[in-house]
Amino acid sequence: EVQLVESGGGLVQPGGSLRLSCSASGFTFSSYAMHWVRQAPGKGLEYVSAVSSNGDSTYYADSVKGRFTISRDNSKNTLYLQMSSLRAEDTAVYYCVQVNSGWYKYWGQGTLVTVSS
Amino acid sequence: EIVLTQSPATLSLSPGERATLSCRASQSVSSYLAWYQQKPGLAPRLLIYDASNRATGIPARFSGSGSGTDFTLTISSLEPEDFAVYYCQQRSDWPRTFGQGTKVEIK
């Protein structure tokens, strides 16, 4: 059974930093691209960032480019999102997603990031 | 960036009725479009991929159609568990984008 478990969310002040982790199990982690998708409270879904299966290629939404860094450790079956210079508009539930044949087939349960003073 | 516009924003229907949801892309996405269902407090679930293919375990009452810029998700006969928010998403180009969602509510 595919499982994606996010952690690392919490309350952070504007301008602060946070690192999210996503622990994967039930599939060969190193064979799949992985993405982060977020959802602000009461709002829709927003793609945040992507990383290729071997970690060589990364992509970012313009809204987070230069502030967020996606990475992965295939030896630990773990995906990361390093977030810095956080803003109130980054407040959201962050989902870790497995990309299967190009689509978001498996999602984690999400971790809430709240940016507030 | 490819903008996906969903309509209507809210659809008020009764169980057993047919639901028709629309998703229009600002430029062609070929057939690289998916539909997701989201219930409150839960992660989205993939329903339809490549415009018309049902994901594993999705009931036959869900169907998708379209290509290019105009797409439709049809629920042939609404079950109580189908009342939720539905999103379309494209993977034709970066950044990946979602529509703003259509809420299917009980009338």
Image: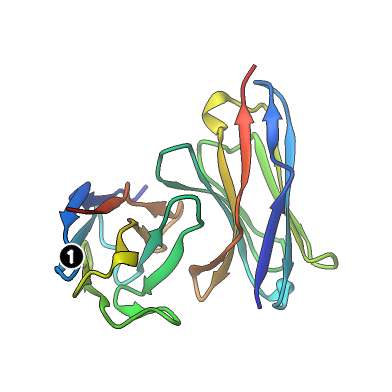
Which quadrant would the C terminus of chain A be assigned to in this image?
top right
Q: Is disc 1 placed on a helix, strand or loop? A: strand
Task: Identify the subunit bearing mark 1.
Answer: B
Is A56 left or right of B31, judged from the image as shown? right
Q: Position of residue A61 (x, y in %)?
A: 51, 44
On the image, the x and y values in percent for residue A59 come to 58, 52
Q: Quarter-wise, where is residue B85 in the image?
A: bottom left
Of residues A113 and A84, which is closer to you in this image?
Answer: A113
At a point 22% along the width and 65% down the height, the residue shown is B71
Image quadrant containing the N terminus of chain A: bottom right
Task: Estimate the x, y position of residue A74 in percent, counting from the top left.
Answer: 79, 67
At 63% across and 36% down in the image, what residue appears? Answer: A113
The answer to whether one can see residue A67 in this image is yes
Number of marks drawn: 1
**Does residue A79 appear left or right of residue A43 in this picture?**
right
The x, y position of residue A100, in whole percent, is: 54, 74
Residue at the top extreme of this rendering: A117
What kind of colouring is applied to the model shown? rainbow
* Residue at horizontal 17 percent and vertical 64 percent from the top: B20
Check the image and name the residue furthest to the right.
Answer: A75
Quarter of the view holding residue B14: bottom left
Q: Residues within 10 Å of mark 1 (few under 14, many from 20)?
A: many
* Residue holding disc 1: B19
Residue depicted at x 38% and y 73%: B49
Horizontal side, residue B56 vs residue A22: left or right: left
Q: What kind of residue is marked 1?
A: Ala
